[in-house]
Image (cartoon, rainbow, N blue to C red):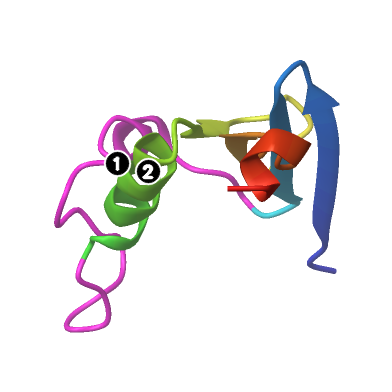
Amino acid sequence: MPQLWLEGELQGDKYRLRVRDNGHGIDDETRKHLFEPFFTTKPGEHGLGLGLTLSASLAAAARGSLSVEHPASGGTAFVLSLPLVNAPTESAESL
């Protein structure tokens, strides 16, 4: 039965969100190209191959990162790490 797990945790000044599944995983050749523009494993006209590239670029623009893990137990995990946003200080609010 397909399953999906979401796990989040604080790591220093960043928040780390891990999205993991129990699927068949990603083969070695595909792993090499996951974040390349226009690379897709979807057949025919069903994918542009920009989703992971765009997502990783947006994470980097926010001073974060997007990565992939391949758990020994199987499946795949994508990890989004983003810096925490500090609450405004009183001096900034009074401006």
Which amino acid is tagged 1?
A: Phe
**Viewed as shown, does residue 39 lie left or right of 34?**
left
Of residues 34 and 89, which is closer to you in this image?
Answer: 89
Residue 90's image quarter? top right
Which amino acid is tagged 2?
A: Ala
Residue pictured at 17% horizontal, 84% vertical? 45
Q: Residues within 10 Å of mark 2 (few under 14, many from 20)?
A: some
Residue 82 belongs to magenta span? no
Residue 63 appears at what percent x and percent y?
Answer: 44, 31
Which residue is tagged 2? 56
Which residue is tagged 1? 35
Residue 49 appears at what percent x and percent y?
Answer: 23, 61
| Looking at the image, residue 40 lies above or below residue 53 | below
Hey, which residue is sitting farthest front in the picture? Answer: 94
Residue stretch in magenta:
24-48
Of residues 35 and 83, which is closer to you in this image?
Answer: 83
User: Is residue 48 at least partly visible in the picture?
Assistant: yes
Residue 42 belongs to magenta span? yes
| Looking at the image, residue 83 lies above or below residue 93 | above
SS state under label 1: loop
Q: Are marks 1 and 2 in contact (CB under 8 Å)?
A: yes
Residue pictured at 47% horizontal, 32% vertical? 65
SS state under label 2: helix
